[in-house]
Amino acid sequence: MVAASKLILLAGATSVLVTLCGCAQRYQIVWGDMHGHTNLSDGKGSLDDYFRHARDVAKLDFVIVTDHDFGNGKPTWRMPQETWTFTQNKADEYTTNDHFVAIAGYEWTSQPKYWTEVGANLRSERLFPGPPRFFNHKNVYFPSPVPHLFSSKDTAYHTPDLLADAVRKTGGLIHNAHPDPKPTGRDQFDYAPSAYDVIANTEMWADVIQFGGTNHPTRGEQTVRAFLDRGGRTGFVGGTDTHEGKPAARTAVLVRRLTRAAIFDALRHRRNYAVNHARIELDFRINGHIMGGEVEVKGCPRIVVEVIGTAPIEEVAVVRDGAVIHAINPRKTQARLNCVDRNFGGSSYYYIRVTQSDKDKHGNKSCAWSSPIWARSVSSAAQHD
């Protein structure tokens, strides 16, 4: 039997008070979009259009704008200094604490053609020596204005590790954009564990996405899991990657207050989760510790999940080390899962995947993916240390 949810609704329709397990920690869920473009790069509409749509139409609590630093249009374009300054000023103009937060960012658009040895008859800009690297793209954003962006074409910032070192000094953050399962994403997670505090999150999506009446095998969740399976650390965020200037709710962040500083603190600690459509409210803890963290466990981990959906919930699944170990099928709009992992091997990551019965206009069911929790037994932690 599914117990009644303990998530208590606050005044805002999109916010909840997290009081699970009697913990004193109280968080508000705020909704945002982590990835979107305007006519300053290859999108449509102005910055004003973008921020107004986020605030007034989509009713978001926060939004990040991430126009490209470089692109392939004709003629080839880049984000000049005056555009970056303009973007930051606009974000500040639209930010009102406890009402709406706008964040200035950009998409670090690494491309294989920047290396010299791309092969015969292939286009190369010949910026960096050696064979091409397939780093994919990363979204970079800052809590306060910075003098200049760290370009994917600059030798000082052209690898994820160099980028992370520079962004760390500003208090900024990075997340991996649109994970790519193909060879074109071969090096997207090729950065040192020391960068995990800055490259804190990755965009999460389903393994198959329907669009235009066709199923597209994107392998999004599978690609992110592969990184986790080899010891990587990342939380989950979502973004529309809109090029129409129409951001929407794709990321939920757990904050104590709606401010830019609080959002950055939550994202840095991975107190966030991704959704692909509906605003599913989700709380996930292991032994009382909230999503995104690491926990030392005596005995076996106790997993507690609370969900408030917007439609009947088809499944709440617990994923451990890449495999579903427990699931419930409540068929109601609220669900509670409480279980103990008695097969815990001493060190594992866990995350929650929620699937609802409703679908978006393309036929994709609404889902939510919590950021992981990494659990280690006390004995294993002692041996590791």
Image: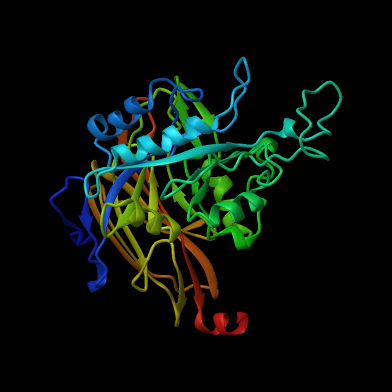
Q: How many tags in the picture? A: 0
Q: In the picture shown, does residue 366 fall above or below 202? A: above
Q: Quadrant of the N terminus?
A: bottom left
128 or 381, which lies in front? 128
Instruction: Report the colour scheme.
Output: rainbow
Q: Quadrant of the C terminus?
A: bottom right
- Residue drawn at the location 41% of the way across and 39% of the way down: 88
Q: Quadrant of residue 102?
A: top left
Q: Is residue 231 visible?
A: no
Q: Residue furthest left?
A: 11
Q: Residue furthest right?
A: 120
Q: Is residue 59 visible?
A: yes
Residue 24, image x and y in percent? Answer: 24, 72
Horizontal placement of 297 versus 111: left or right?
left
Residue 222, image x and y in percent? Answer: 56, 46
Residue 215, image x and y in percent? Answer: 50, 27
Q: Quadrant of residue 100?
A: top left
360 or 102, which lies in front? 102
Q: In the picture shown, does residue 213 fall above or below 34? A: above
367 or 148, which lies in front? 148
- Residue drawn at the location 55% of the way across and 35% of the way down: 218
- Residue drawn at the location 59% of the way across and 52% of the way down: 166
Residue 292, image x and y in percent? Answer: 43, 61
Q: In the picture shown, does residue 327 fall above or below 237? A: below
